[in-house]
Image (cartoon, rainbow, N blue to C red):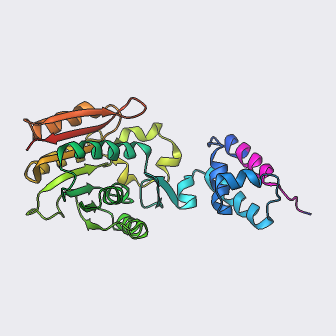
Amino acid sequence: MEKIFKVYEALKWASSFLGEHGREAHAAELLLLDILKINRTTLFMIMRDELHAEDFERFQQAVQRHANGIPVQYIIGFESFFGRMFKVNGDVLIPRPETEELIFYALERSDVLFPASAELLAADIGTGSGAIAVTLKLERPKWQVKAVDLSTKALTIAKNNAASLGADVEFLEGDLLRPLDRSKKLDIVLSNPPYIPYADRETMSDVVVKHEPHQALFADEEGLVLYRKMCEQLPERMNSPGLIGFEVGAGQGQKVQQMLKKAFPQEEVEIVHDINGKDRMVFCRIKA
């Protein structure tokens, strides 16, 4: 006869199993919450209840998948970003907290640069799951927001997220700024492009390298090629006043700052550190 696990016993087993496989034990709770379709408060209330056999079987399978390296977010199909749930799968990068900071600081700066009533044109270059574009539209409903990506599959996910979250965003397929209408200058451009040097693959977690899309992770020229290309395209595409914000890899801030300073020699370009003290964002404020 199969053993019937109580909820706390199942969690204890899963946490231990994941720890033995070099994974975060906390992932067990996230997986069980998804399988049972409950929140943490309810989970604590049912800790001593018996887990249905079919739920435990599904839980075992999910835990095994994560132990094998599949990110939790791809197993449950969602990631929280700026207080909203975004659908994700292996076609898109999993949204990170650092990108939430990019949006926070961009909105903070835009509120200083532009009147509150301004109907601005904003673009998210390399949108992936649509996290930046959708968040911008929902946080600033008056803005017109466009989002660009090379990947047809990523755009399918992004459009799905925009629809489910009620964000009216226009999605365009293509390379960097090229798909955008050249006759309409941009007020705000944000981008979290691929920026990891290919040489870094050897030291990265297998959860990332084996499962997240390399097109969204890695870039040539020590991770800087897309910043260089955008800095070449942006001067003739930006309005004044205007705001450009890039997320960058740790240690890339000064080089990206120099690129933006070369493109906009008269403007203020600043490096902003993330909550962990790493140079993570570079902003260029274009004066009126």
Asked if the magenta segment contains residue 146, the reply would be: no
Q: Which quarter of the rendering shows the C terminus?
A: top left
Q: Nearer the viewer, residue 245 or 251?
A: 245
Pinpoint residue 168: horizontal percent, then vertical percent.
31, 68
**For this view, does 207 lie left or right of residue 19?**
left
Q: Is residue 35 visible?
A: yes
Instruction: Judge by depth and name the residue closer to the eye, 57 or 80.
Output: 80
* Relative image position of residue 132 (x, y in whole percent): 34, 54
Q: Position of residue 159 (x, y in %)?
A: 36, 68
Q: Position of residue 171 (x, y in %)?
A: 28, 67
Q: Residue at x 36, y 53 (%)?
A: 216
Vertical relation: 224 (above or below) 155: above
Which image quarter holds the N terminus?
bottom right
Magenta span has 14? yes
Q: Nearer the viewer, residue 167 or 86?
A: 167
In the image, 184: left or right of 247? left
**Secondary structure mostly seen in the magenta stretch:** helix
- Report whether 4 appears left or right of 107: right
**Would residue 220 be visible to someone looking at this image?**
no
Residue ranking furthest to the right? 1
Specify the quadrant of the image occupied by residue 148: bottom left
| Magenta stretch bounds | 2-16
User: In the image, what residue occupies the spot 82% across and 57% down?
Assistant: 49
Number of labels in the image equals 0
Q: Quadrant location of residue 20?
A: top right
Name the residue rendered at 67%, 52% in the picture: 41
Between 157 and 268, the residue placed more toward the observer is 268
Q: Residue at position x 76%, y 61% from top?
A: 56
